[in-house]
Image (cartoon, rainbow, N blue to C red):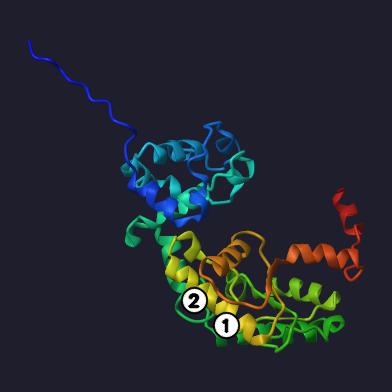
Amino acid sequence: MSESIVKIKGKKESSFLDKVKEIIPDGGNLNLCLTCGACASGCPATGLADMDPRKFLRMCAMGMDKEVLSTPWVWMCTMCQRCIYVCPMKIDIPQLVFNARAEWPREDRPKGIRDSCDMALRNDSNSAMGTAPDDFVFVVEDVLAEYQESQPEFKDMEAPIDKPGAFFFLNQNSREPVTEPDEMVPLWKILNLAGVDWTYGSKGWAAENYCLFLADNECWERVTRVSANQADELGCKVFLNTEWGHITFSVRAGLKKFNIDHNFEVASIYQYYAKWIREGRLKVNSDWNKDRKV
């Protein structure tokens, strides 16, 4: 009678997990998971593609590389970092997702994100719409002149570009100069009323970074460097982001990740809105809410 020998092996080795742990600081705390599920409870992508952050991390830990590196869920995760915020062990699951994206062949990554990243590399605007620096300058100057003439109360309003020594280096969503140029004006009015010293850059003015979402480090670095160099060349003290989300993160993280020397701080315009209101530089009035019964 032959004997059957059963060999019990340890956990399956994961080349992907080991690779990621070498890349991110302190290994991203990826070995500290308590499987509590807090990450999944607050994740907007939980349940999509039959996946959630806890399940994704456990699959990585179990060495299920093939499944981990083929699930479309990594492109559904917004990398918003809610999972880190609620995790008692502060495990960096978004970094795990980012590196999983980077393992995909570039041609297999989502076309929309890929095309927007590639468009941003066409010129030094960093614009995902491909808007060239001279086109941006033309649109800004044209729209400014129109409103200075049509609204005399704002005849002194400015929208400077490449102004040396300006305190704030301001970015701008790429879509507005191309498809909705009038949407730039309310921001200019706010800055004018608050007496803010600011400037756009003809280079690096775009307020998005699809190369971050694409997990393309080379392109992410290029976009960040263009903006950082322009802000420093103008001598600006604050790199002011008009959109709080990914662009603030991409600039802050990019400067650190790629060891980019810079002489400015990175901030969101929302914190300055609050500051200008507290200082009385922006007069807040709720009367307009009355008609809306708010």
Q: Is residue 277 left or right of residue 6?
A: right
Q: Position of residue 126 (x, y in %)?
A: 53, 75
Q: Which residue is tagged 1? A: 203
Within 10 Å of the Cα at label 1, are there few (<14), some (14-19), or many (20+) other Cα atoms? many
In the rendered structure, are the residues bearing label 2 and label 1 in contact, judged by CB atoms less than 8 Å apart? no
- Residue found 40% across the figure and 41% down from its top: 60
Determine which quarter of the picture holds residue 43.
top right
Q: Is residue 145 left or right of residue 32?
A: right
**Rendered position, 231 above or below 45:** below
Q: Which mark is residue 246?
A: none
**Quarter that holds the N terminus:** top left
Q: Quadrant of residue 204?
A: bottom right
Where in the figure is residue 82, as x and y percent of width and height?
A: 61, 46
Mark 2 vs mark 1: give the one in front: 1
Counting residues from the N terminus, which is met first, the one under dot 2 or under dot 1? 2
Residue to which mark 2 is pinned: 130
Q: Which residue appears at 59% of the width and 40% of the height?
A: 89
Kind of residue at disc 1? Lys
209 on left or right of 66: right
Q: Nearer the viewer, residue 205 or 132?
A: 205
Q: Name the outermost residue toward the top.
A: 1
Q: Given the image, on which type of amino acid does mark 2 rest? A: Gly
Q: Secondary structure at mark 1?
A: loop
Dot 2, how many residues are within 10 Å of its Cα: few (below 14), some (14-19), or many (20+)?
many
Mark 2 and mark 1: Cα distance apart in space:
12 Å
Decide: is 58 above or below 205: above
Q: Quick check: can you spot residue 21?
A: yes
**What x and y, as percent, mark residue 214?**
44, 61
Front residue (pair 160, 33): 33
